[in-house]
Amino acid sequence: MDSTADPGDEQASRRRRLLLWLRSGRQRLQTWAAVVRQRFREFALGILSTLIALLLLIPFVWLVQEARAVGTDELVSIVFSSGTLDIVLNSMLLTGSVTACSILIGVPLAILTVQTDLPFRRFWTVVAALPLVIPSYIGAFAFVSAFGPRGVLQDALAPLGIQKLPEIYGLLGATLVLTLYTYPYVYLTTRASLLSFDGTVVEAARTLNHSRWKAFRRVTLPQIKPGIAAGSLLVALYTLSDFGTPQIMRYDVFTRMIYVRYNNFLLGRAAVLSLLLLALTVIILAMESRISASNEGAHVSSGSRRPGRISLGYWKLPALGFCSLIAGLGLALPIGILVMWLRRPSPGFAEGGFDFQFGFLLNSVSVSLAAAVIAVIVGLPLAYLSARSDSRFGSLPERASYIGYATPGVVVGLALLVFGIRYASVLYGTVFMLVFAYVVRFVPQAIGTMKSSVLQVDPKYVEAAQSMGDSPLRSFRRVVLPQITPGIVAGGALVFLTTMKELPATLILKPLGQETIVTYIWQVQEAAYYGQAAVPALLLVCISALSMVIILRQDSFDGT
């Protein structure tokens, strides 16, 4: 038998090996080309996102330039003056007191509505969150109308011989009002932590003869501390950035003094104070980051079982009284004051030029809608890049956009005002500048919801669409966009509803003669024509209530 290999078979074998090598090479080439295309698309998206982030940071660059133009001697005198020190102390005192009081109200309310047998818990769950729909400046002038000089309460007590009530203005009044309209941040975040808390851990602690208080302090509190910290950060940032309440309560903080300097055409001094306020904001963010780092791993339980209901017993009536007191002060009082002023309008408003026109509401809706649409368009590339990129560079533009969100509206307004006066006079005093301020402030709200939606889309679906010949844009439109549409709508709605309530940036940047609902409310409040503020304030509260519908829809009210 001939053992010599057939030359034809050997040649065929070589051809097969060559064909396999060519096929594998083509596959490697296709894989390499796909990776290159993917990297190129990520790079192009990263460049686009970076340009958008830099555009959003433009106001702060020019703010620094304006502060530098003040001069070294004047800069030092402003920073180290006794007046500036008083402002710093006042701002820190107000922020600290409001944050502490919000924790003292929000955490007990969360525990009562989640872990106890409080009567009508579902009702109190909703009511405890509703003060968030009332802008704090509306609450402030309602409290002044009720408790201020010649207010409703003083008029009611005058026949009894009480001619003077304790002063509502100053730190006490500002703390009271801001606490009532910011504690829901702590309440909602703490409630969310309690709803996701594994109750078997508490039950295990109870089997070790721990009292309920000891089990709460050693087991529950460490688990919900990140939620409390998150809500406290929102309260602190809101308090630090609020302008309307300190202005109405005549309490000198950064936002009020910046606005005073702006009205006196002292833009350089206002810019310096704005940078100091930004520095204080950064300090608060850094403190929250350290707290969050120390709480890392607090949410270690993954169970869904909740602890048994705590019987309030004799504490049931005091608990109901506590809930009723907060609801009465935060909801019933301001709404009652608005309804009262609606039925008893202030005389002389027409002569003062304060007649309300529904065109003011249309102006607010139009600019808010424009801001919502632009925020979604601008935020979508940043959200998509942050959700799909594995590198730090991918999340950097998204993080940069949060600078505007953490910056008070009065600072953003002033920065854009300075920028418009010095370098973009064609845009100064236009609706475009106002809408841009809204986008700078609130685009992270749209980014957050859209990013969450993008993360829920399986990348394999996009890859499958592209393997069938779809271009990246077509695959995004056919596969990704339908799945993230709810997130887009939710993000746009949040931007719209938050923009409707924005006061300081609107006061500074609104075009001449184009009033909005918030600027009208502010004008009549300043002129003490409270009756004329009733209709627009109630309209604004009703529109703002839609934002709470979005928030509460995320909560299934399990166990309530």
Image (cartoon, rainbow, N blue to C red):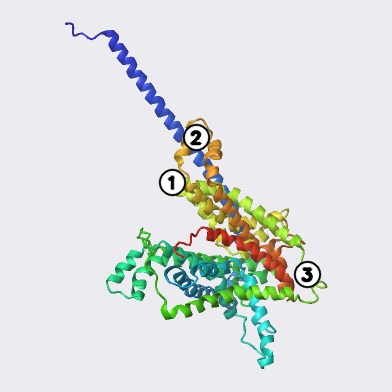
According to the picture, the residue beneath numbered tag 3 turns out to be 354
- Three-letter code, disc 2: Ala
Disc 2 vs disc 1: Cβ atoms closer than 8 Å? no
- Foreground mark, 1 or 3, reads 3
Q: In the image, which is nearer the foreground, mark 2 or mark 1?
A: 2
Helix, strand or loop for disc 3: loop
Q: CA distance from mark 1 to mark 3?
A: 55 Å
* Disc 2 from disc 1: Cα separation: 22 Å
Marks 1 and 3, the one that precedes in the sequence: 3
Badge number at residue 502: none
User: In terms of image quadrants, where is residue 61?
Assistant: bottom right
Q: Is residue 406 left or right of residue 28?
A: right
Label 1 element class:
loop
Q: Residue 351 vs residue 15: left or right?
A: right
What amino acid is found at the position of numbered circle 3 in the picture? Answer: Phe
Residue 149 lies, with reference to residue 514, above or below; the image says below
Q: Residues within 10 Å of mark 2 (few under 14, many from 20)?
A: some
Q: Which residue is mark 2?
A: 465
**Residue 72 visible in the displayed image:** no
Please name whichever residue, 32 or 216, is drawn nearer the observer in this view of the structure.
216
Amino acid type for the residue under numbered disc 1: Asp
Q: Which mark is residue 390?
A: 1
Kindly report the distance in space between the C-alpha atoms of the residues bearing marks 3 and 2: 59 Å
User: Is tag 3's residue or tag 2's residue first in the polypeptide sequence?
Assistant: 3
Q: List x then y, in percent, for residue 366.
A: 70, 55
Residue at left offset 73%, top offset 74%: 343
